Amino acid sequence: MTHASLTDTSHTDTSHTDTTELADTSQSGVLAQPYAGPGESGGPDPAGTLLRVEGLGVSFAQPGGRRRVRVLDDVALTVRAGEIVGIVGETGSGKTTLARAIAGLTAPDRGRVHLAGEDIAGLRGRARRRFRRVGAIQFIFQDPLRSLDPALTVGTSIGEGLAIAGSGSRAQRAERVADALRQVGLDPAVAGRLPAQISGGQRQRASIARAVISDPALLLCDEPVSALDASNRNHILLLLDELRQRLSVGIAVISHDLSTLAGIADRVVVLYRGRVVEDGPIAEVFARPRHPYTALLIASAPDIHGRDRHAAARLRPVGTSRDPASRRTGECVFAHRCRFATDACAETPPRRAATDHPGGDWVVACHHADTWRDELDTAPAPAASRKDFPT
Amino acid sequence: MPESAAGPAEVLLKVDGLRITVGGERTEAVRGVSFEVRRGEAVGIVGESGSGKTLACRSVLGVLAPGCAVSGGTIDFDGTSLVGLPRRGWEQLRGTRIAAVFQDPASYLNPSYPVGHQLAEQLRVKHGRARRDARADAVRLLAAMGLHDPERVYRQYPHQLSGGMLQRVVLAIAVSGDPELLIADEATTALDVTIQAEVLELLAGLRAERGLAVIAVSHDLAVIAEFCDRVLVFYAGELVEAGPTQAVLHAPRHPYTEALLRVASVGSWERRSLAVIDGQPPHVGAELPGCRFADRCAFATQQCRTRPVALTEQPDGRSVRCRRVDELALSGAGAATAAGAAS
Ligand SMILES: Nc1ncnc2c1ncn2[C@@H]1O[C@H](COP(=O)(O)OP(=O)(O)O)[C@@H](O)[C@H]1O
Ligand SMILES: Nc1ncnc2c1ncn2[C@@H]1O[C@H](COP(=O)(O)OP(=O)(O)O)[C@@H](O)[C@H]1O
Ligand code: SF4
Ligand code: SF4
Ligand SMILES: [Mg+2]
Ligand SMILES: [Mg+2]
């Protein structure tokens, strides 16, 4: 693979990944209390910050080798209660690993994950089990069959956690399941069906019901709509939008598709090869991206009203891009595909507040964040949209 | 563009009243579809998953899965009738005059041979190049597909290449015989958006270069808008609207096209409205007395549900399958949102 140059040689033993389901309640004797929520825990975070990730790093051992591949490097992001943060990046950029590390399913080797002020990445043993049992963080996968057992009725899957915890009477649990189904816009009668007997869109709703029944503080949705057609996609996005308002839950939505995020996210975090290259208010980022990769992403998205192919072509390197495997240690992660790379880019660009956003709600990791556009405007448009196409 | 001063280009493919059954003879998944593709023209097919797009493409390629069969209609490719064409006839067409790329390039390559060898083999066996020339031509073709260091790619195995690189290799194989028609069924769906853009540009370049006609299938209207001259909108096995891409996308005339446009990612990145189409399409093969979209249509009347609806030619050059086409003033959601984006 092309990650050879991303390796670092630390041998810390943090590679074990824990694949137990998040809402694992098997250790529990009593129903966990709903998570206290932000603000009540007296943590050090500014009001409303629910999730704060800082300096997060994850690396994996290479098969057979002693080297480790760094998959996430110095990742930082925050999610406030009631906020939807979109996380976008291409295949292999580390989106799923990031979500798993936040949820404690993959052990980070660096950095901190604070949920309402509490460092959850550092939890071990009983404290970690207790945290999981509470179900404060819930996962929603692209394929709802990962959270709904095909052999169980939808209602059984949704109420599983409550049943194992022995919480309430059978009738009370059934009522909570019905409630959860209504929350996600499904007829409570769906509880009696098997996952195979409902549509893909309904299944994804059911898996959201399973997530919200434990009253989570944070929902991590990993490509929740990628398998759905546009109409069902919008149904699910509307539902997430409604839940964040109604339940004040913080939501991180991972997607490789900008248009999915454009509809609902308040902010967007752009990941490229394991690093956050841009993080800011989504409407403003989409209107005027500050990082060359974000700009390329936006210019590449097909558009019903016709995409300006020159806009994308002008953001690609002149000539052909370098082989990603040739990446030099410490270089900007995007340098091999960046039209604006200079000698300065041999050093990893620091994350800096966008000049007109000194408050830090918009950060960019590019040495030339303020100047690459000038070059863009003066650069002659390429003769053809593909320079390397022989004529 | 297929139109020139000399008038429209000659018809290359003519599909007339195509019917395809699946899993037993009674289940009709494609129900009387007719369309034409002219030389050099790019025709897009859009519609929800399950609407029959892939079946229609596969029938043109003569590669329907077992259990699926053309049960009616004709397919004419430049004077050759493709329905019931014997194997020998297909050998002279498929991979030569008609080529195809699909969503999963890896499954069309042999995992145990370097990709360059597979391309050279195609050039040698199928197109009669000498071994030496085949290698040089293969490297040149890989370069033409925008692959950098083509000599190295030539020697690589499929598992060593990314999805975008594999799709370029498969495209190289597809165009190696200088086909007249290329069928691209969800060919960029699995690619990252920056790579998708490059592959779409490559396809557009190939069209311009080689006068290639293309049938592009996508569930994403925006991909079709990118480079198709005309668009065919499929719903539940039927063609419901057909016409020039820009006209259809700016002012849809069938309620389903309009609904598709509303839910698609239209124009504005900053804030998109999240429209939905309530309900589900009818089951594949369902026999309904009236319009197949009626259960989901805001304009449905009793007549819509009880009487069959024909595809009718409109004065503006479109075909629309809607009984109320003349009364409805559809919003043209796409255009409305575009105006919103500009503000
Ligand atoms: N358990 C693992 N062991 C080794 N490598 C992994 C593991 N999980 C993910 N990776 C690698 O980490 C990188 C990021 O993967 P992932 O987080 O799944 O990306 P994304 O979700 O953005 O597509 C990929 O190169 C992937 O191969
Ligand atoms: N090999 C097959 N066997 C049975 N049914 C099939 C087969 N191929 C397609 N179908 C059915 O025909 C309908 C149309 O399929 P398809 O052409 O693949 O749709 P699209 O490409 O528009 O998503 C679907 O409902 C599908 O279930
Ligand atoms: S730091 Fe340099 S290489 Fe990286 S994105 Fe900015 S200009 Fe491009
Ligand atoms: S025929 Fe009737 S039901 Fe069908 S699309 Fe037209 S108005 Fe709607
Ligand atoms: Mg992933
Ligand atoms: Mg298909």
Image: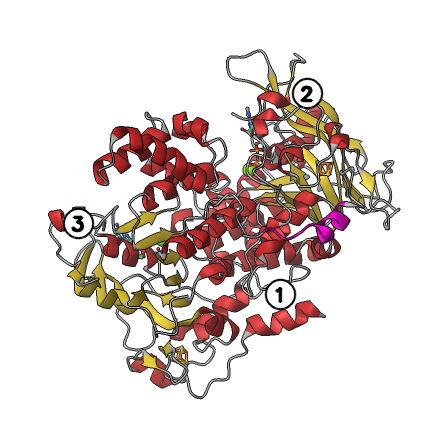
* Rendered image quadrant of residue B76: bottom left
Instruction: Give the magenta part as a residue range.
Output: A372-382
Q: In this figure, which residue is indicated by the disc labeled 2?
A: A125
Is the magenta region chiefly helix, strand or loop?
helix
* Residue at 50% over, 42% down: A157
Instruction: Please tell me which residue lies in front, B55 or A183.
Output: B55
Please state which amino acid type lies under the numbered disc 3: Trp
Q: Are the numbered discs 3 and 2 placed on the same chain, yes or no?
A: no
- Which quadrant is home to the N terminus of chain B? bottom left
SS at mark 2 in the image: helix
Q: In this figure, which residue is indicated by the disc labeled 1?
A: B273
> Which circle marks residue B90 in the picture?
3
Which is more foreground, mark 3 or mark 2?
3
Residue B129 placed where, x, y %? 25, 36
- Which quadrant is home to the C terminus of chain B? bottom right
Indicate yes or no whether the magenta region holds residue A379.
yes
Chain letter for mark 3, please: B
Please state which amino acid type lies under the numbered disc 1: Ser
Residue A265 placed where, x, y %? 68, 53
Instruction: Please tell me which residue lies in front, B200 or B125.
Output: B125
SS at mark 3 in the image: helix
Left or right, residue B163 beside residue A91: left
Indicate yes or no whether the magenta region holds residue B231.
no
Measure the alpha-carbon separation of dots 3 and 1.
Answer: 47 Å
SS at mark 1 in the image: loop
If the picture is divided into quarters, which one holds ligand 2? bottom left
Chain letter for mark 2, please: A
Look at the image and tell me whether residue A248 can be seen.
no
The local crowd at label 3, few if under 14, some if 14 to 19, many if 20 or more residues have their Cα within 10 Å, is some
Look at the image and tell me whether residue A171 can be seen.
yes
